[in-house]
Image (tube, rainbow, N blue to C red):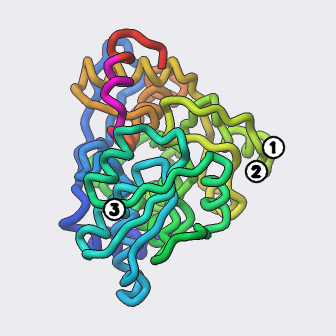
Amino acid sequence: MIDLAAIEAAARRIKGTALRTPLVRLHVEDAPAEIYLKLENLQPINSFKIRGATNAIMLAPASARAKGLVTASAGNMAQGIAWAARTLGVPATIIVPDHAPEAKLAAIERLGGRVLKLPYDDWWNVIVTSRASGTEGLFVHPVQDAGVMAGNGTIGLEILDDLPDPDAVVIPYGGGGLTVGIASAIRALRPQTKILTAEPDTAAALVAALDAGKPADVDYRASFVDGSGSRRVLDSMWPLVAPLVDRALSIGVSEVATAVRTLAERARVIAEGAGALAPAAALTGRAGSGKVVCVVSGGNINLSKLAEILNGAPG
């Protein structure tokens, strides 16, 4: 659990870089809950990752980042690091899996980042070991860095400031850094609020871990929900995540696609696959009733894929 004081300090540190995003009601007839959307897709990089990246980098000594910044990411943390590197005037090297979407790769390059593609297993090894051969600079882990998690936790502060009594907060689960950050803030300030996570059923590692009582490998299959899910819960994150999560939900990729369409049609919100996971959980009733807050984590989706989904493709 991240200390509340660290999250509050992060909020002060990132003010002026990360936006204070709105919490808006999603109006859908016969919805199973009162659904609210925390619109992190409206950040300057269209993703919550700018919060944790900025906080972690500002916490590091200037000498550590002088040679540049390095991270491993499917795309959104990459943009956060590239954004910060451009601001600091240092190079950024981003290691991405070979299935990373072109929309995210193009955004990295627009920000001046250097993209290094690796096969998924090799990329995952960088995530596990926090080491990237052939790169130089400060490695900012996209998940398990305490500064990253504290920055992510500022979302929880904002949610409770706008809606003091949510019954549940649903968070897309990728590596766990977003979940630990937000859940730490919520647990400290409103412990009766349920913390739920959502993953695609093609990569539901947290669901498997909670069922087994420990991290377990799953049959990972890539999908357009590229920013969430994994082959296994990181061993380093398991003791942090397990006590904070009340329930983990596995969501079908076609249900995520339906949520992408619903958000576009009913709220004029563009969400990427991971960003639509939490709304999909709420819209299908799996997040329960009452006031349900859904973290729309990002909006970086290939326009061609978005067009397919809006035209009825199942994902």
Residue nearest the observer in this picture, 136 or 191: 136
Proximity of marks 2 and 1: CB atoms separated by less than 8 Å:
yes
User: Secondary structure beneath disc 2?
Assistant: loop
For disc 1, the neighbor class at 10 Å (few under 14, some 14 to 19, many from 20) is few
The residue under the point 34% across, 48% down is: 47
The magenta segment is 300-307
Q: Residue at x 43, y 38 (%)?
A: 101
SS type, badge 1:
helix
User: Which quarter of the figure is the N terminus placed in?
Assistant: bottom right
On the rendered structure, is 24 left or right of 71?
Answer: left
Mark seen at residue 157:
none
Image quadrant where residue 13 sits: bottom left
Residue 187 seen in render: no
Name the spot of residue 28 as percent of width and height, x first. Answer: 31, 17
Label 2, label 1: how many angstroms apart (C-alpha)? 7 Å
Q: Which residue is mark 1?
A: 212
Q: Nearer the viewer, residue 37 or 33?
A: 37
- Specify the amino acid type for callout 3: Ala
Q: Three-letter amino acid code at disc 2?
A: Pro
**2 or 3: tag closer to the N-terminus:** 3
Q: Earlier in the sequence, mark 1 or mark 3?
A: 3
Q: Measured from the top left, where is residue 246 in percent x and y?
A: 61, 44
Q: Nearer the viewer, mark 1 or mark 3?
A: 3
Give the alpha-carbon distance from disc 1 to disc 3, as whole Å: 37 Å
Tell me the amino acid under the disc marked 1: Ala
Query: In the rendered image, which residue does mark 3 sit on?
Result: 82
**Residue, disc 2:** 215
The answer to whether marks 1 and 3 mark residues whose Cβ atoms lie closer than 8 Å is no
Callout 3: few (<14), some (14-19), or many (20+) C-alpha neighbours within 10 Å?
A: many
Q: State yes or no: discs 2 and 3 in contact (Cβ < 8 Å).
A: no
Please tell me whether the stretch drawn in magenta is mainly helix, strand or loop: helix
